[in-house]
Image (tube, helix red, strand yellow):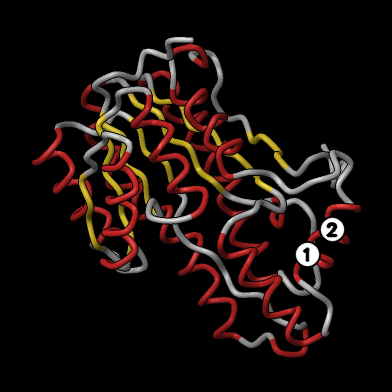
Amino acid sequence: MNLGLEGRVVLITGGSKGIGYACAEAFAAEGARVALVSRSEANLAAAAAQLAAKGHKPLCIVADLVQRDAGDRIVAEAVRTLGPVDVLVNSAGAAKRYAPEEIDVAAWHDAMDAKYFTCVHAIQAVLPGMLARNRGAIINIIGMGGKVAGPVHMPGGAANAALMLVTAGMAHAYGKKGIRVNAINPGLTMTGRVGEGMAAESRRSGVTSAELIAKSAERIPLGRFAKPEEIASVAVFLASGHASYVTGAIIPMDGGTNPVI
């Protein structure tokens, strides 16, 4: 299926690893001009090398989107090098998990910085250009923690819930200006971050990572973790003209784990 994304400029935050990288690969395969944003120059270099091996040449931008002016800077660099941003994929940021008794005021602020403001800073930066052109697509990769309250993910879950409200609110506010805003809520996805978490738990418990993954997968109705590429496929669809009447959608991708509306 031709998704009509050839030549489109796609800015992907958190684009050097995990779901963000999978999105970069998927958009590049569709012929889009891709800009990757990460705090780590080394991670960006590794991502660029992987994409180059597949015949793609991304623009790489080092930035920490917790900083208030970082959004304007990354958009300005993308526009200067590639042209106006057609699509923003927000995949940056991950809030830490805490046992309830470990949560303090700093934990709440850190979670909002790590997940909420990293996305909001990028959104606010691309909006003026999209409004001027009466066209644009924004896809926020959020997480099911904003729908299901977990005792070790309360600060991060609150940030996720806030981003879902932003997604729905902006879709309503800017639909008449040709801007579509949607979100994806992944569940357990086989990324490097999840692998690192399983390895840490393996060291603590003495249970192998493979056993821990299998036990976690048993609780998923589809029987397995998601692949980053599966999340990316939905992001590419949402950015395309095939989803031209989809806005304000918050799509769960947790394999049916949480039966919530």
Snapshot quadrant of residue 132: top left
> In front here: 190 or 94?
190
Residue count near mark 2 (Cα–Cα under 10 Å), binned few <14, some 14–19, many ≥20: some
Residue 130 visible in the current orientation: no
Q: Which residue is mark 1?
A: 210
The residues bearing labels 2 and 1 have C-alpha atoms spaced at a distance of: 6 Å
In the rendered view, would you say 53 is above or below 207? above
In the rendered view, would you say 72 is above or below 152? above
Left or right: 13 in relation to 63: right
Q: Which mark is residue 160?
A: none
Decide: marks 2, 1 in contact (CB < 8 A)?
yes
Tell me which amino acid carries mark 1. Ala
User: Looking at the figure, which quarter contains the C terminus?
Assistant: top right
Expressed as whole percent of the image width and height from the top left, the position of residue 13 reads: 37, 51
Number of marks: 2
In the rendered view, would you say 255 is above or below 47? above
Left or right: 179 in relation to 79: right
Q: Residue at image x 59%, y 85%?
A: 105
Q: Which residue is mark 2?
A: 214
Residue count near mark 1 (Cα–Cα under 10 Å), binned few <14, some 14–19, many ≥20: few
